[in-house]
Image (cartoon, rainbow, N blue to C red):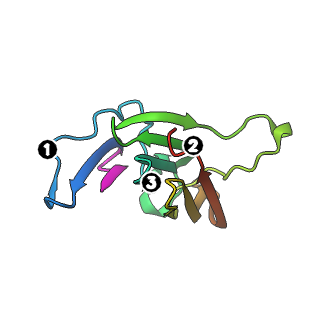
């Protein structure tokens, strides 16, 4: 089991592994995440058969109002290689509006889950969250699914 990113007085870009068999935390952190943009309240899941971790969005700039406000959010998708504990790729929302590719808006405070098939493919589902800013925070009620169809990325 892995915990990636979070908040400890500031957004983090670290990761920690818990061994379910031994019932203990690894002595060191996931060292290959130093180039991950620090974030909290993001969606994280893993597709164990492909050994891939997936992060979507999160708060990258905390609100001065704390939990009463909406900080700065991101809508990037980050793929992590579970074997090497390094970032495989960071995908950003398409900037060319003519492509008309659907992409979720920036958000944090959202919830998600992984569906994993027997073939090693999987999907990250996430729902709602918080977007906007301190002056205009918006609660979202949308549902998105990101399908990973190549088991060996």
Q: Which mark is residue 47?
A: 3
Categorize mark 2 by other alpha carbons within 10 Å: few (<14), some (14-19), many (20+).
some
- Which secondary structure type mostly characterizes the magenta part of the structure? strand
| Point 28% across, 39% down: residue | 30
User: Which mark sits nearer the N-terminus, 3 or 2?
Assistant: 3
Determine if residue 132 is in view: no
Element under label 3?
A: strand
Give coordinates of residue 109: x percent, y percent: 49, 61
Give coordinates of residue 51: x percent, y percent: 40, 47
User: Which mark sits nearer the N-terminus, 1 or 3?
Assistant: 1
User: Horizontally, is 115 left or right of 144 in the view?
Assistant: left
Name the outermost residue toward the top: 35
Distance between the alpha carbons at the discs numbered 1 and 2: 29 Å
Name the outermost residue toward the right: 98
User: Horizontally, is 51 left or right of 69 in the view?
Assistant: left
**Residue at numbered disc 2:** 76
Residue 133 is inside the magenta segment: no
Residue 4 is inside the magenta segment: yes
Determine if residue 15 is in view: yes
Magenta span: 1-11
User: Horizontally, is 137 left or right of 86 in the view?
Assistant: right
Name the outermost residue toward the bottom: 141
- In the rendered view of the protein, which quadrant contains the N terminus? bottom left
The mark lying in front, picked from 1 and 2, is 1
Give coordinates of residue 82: x percent, y percent: 36, 43
**Residue at numbered disc 1:** 27
User: Which mark sits nearer the N-terminus, 1 or 2?
Assistant: 1
Give coordinates of residue 97: x percent, y percent: 82, 39
User: Horizontally, is 97 left or right of 31 in the view?
Assistant: right
Element under label 1?
A: loop
From the viewer's side, name the closer residue of 5 and 9.
5
| Point 43% across, 54% down: residue | 46
């Amino acid at each position: 089991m892995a915990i990636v990113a979070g908040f400890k007085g500031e957004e983090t870009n670290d990761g920690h592994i818990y061994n379910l068999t031994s019932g203990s935390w690894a002595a060191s952190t996931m060292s290959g995440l130093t180039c991950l943009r620090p974030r909290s309240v993001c969606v994280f899941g893993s597709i164990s058969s492909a050994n891939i971790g997936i992060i979507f969005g999160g708060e990258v700039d905390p609100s001065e109002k704390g939990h009463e406000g909406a900080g700065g959010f991101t809508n990037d998708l980050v793929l992590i290689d579970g074997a090497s504990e390094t970032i495989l790729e960071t995908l950003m929302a398409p900037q060319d509006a003519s492509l008309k590719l659907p992409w979720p808006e920036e958000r944090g405070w959202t919830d998600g889950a992984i569906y994993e098939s027997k073939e090693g493919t999987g999907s990250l589902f996430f729902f709602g969250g918080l977007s906007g800013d301190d002056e205009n925070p918006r609660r979202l009620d949308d549902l998105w699914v990101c399908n990973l169809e190549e088991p060996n990325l």
